[in-house]
Image: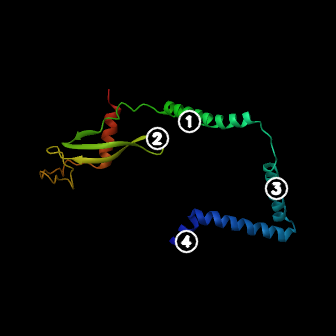
Amino acid sequence: MHISKKIFKNPWFIGVGSSILGFIIIRIIDAIFGSKILLSLWRFFSKIFTSIIHFLNLKFEWPLYGLILLFISGPIIGLLILLIDAKIQRSREKPLPKWYNYRRDTFDGVEYRWDWGKDYAGKYEIRKLCAYCTNCGCVLIGGSCPNCNSKYFMSLKSEDEIKALIYYRIENMD
């Protein structure tokens, strides 16, 4: 049962399966009502295709200076588009918040360090939160320091508690 749910949620199965199902439904409608939907669709798309081919086979006469201007203007217009896009991107960038460099703090005698990153919505969130020994600066493993054997079992807080304290200190910064 679990495998069948995975199969039915697979994008390839949905895309191919819906196309096949649509074709079958159209054939059933053609058979029941005697209409020629597929034939009409074929004629419509073939008419569009032949019109495109006919347009592409038309002959145009351009003077030489027109061709030269066309080849020169293409890179210039492309460069202008790139410059305008770069200027728009720079204007969209927001300055970093004043608390962005706040990346370490001590809570209950344990030093915590973290990085900031943006989530999919563009909001900053705490990443790589880790506890460090206040004596030697080594990463704590299981509540103790592997370097100086200091114990922090009673002082360690959960990750959610530390994040709440960090956000609280950010909100109360002057």
Q: Do labels 2 and 3 touch, CB within 8 Å?
A: no
**Closer to the eye: label 3 or 4:** 3
Expressed as whole percent of the image width and height from the top left, the position of residue 91 reads 50, 30
> Of label 2 and label 1, which has the lower sequence position?
1
> Of label 2 and label 4, which has the lower sequence position?
4
Structural distance between the alpha carbons of marks 2 and 1: 24 Å
Residue farthest toward the bottom in the current orientation of the protein = 1
Quadrant in the rendering for residue 101: top left
Q: Name the residue carrying label 3.
A: 50
Structural distance between the alpha carbons of marks 3 and 4: 44 Å
Q: Which mark is residue 82?
A: 1
In the rendered structure, which amino acid carries the disc numbered 4?
A: Ser
> Of label 4 and label 1, which has the lower sequence position?
4
Q: Is residue 48 left or right of residue 69?
A: right
Expressed as whole percent of the image width and height from the top left, the position of residue 133 reads 18, 46
The 10 Å Cα crowd at callout 4, few under 14, some 14 to 19, many 20 or more, is few
Q: Is residue 81 left or right of residue 57?
A: left
Quadrant in the rendering for residue 18: bottom right
Q: Name the residue carrying label 2.
A: 122
Q: Quadrant of the C terminus?
A: top left
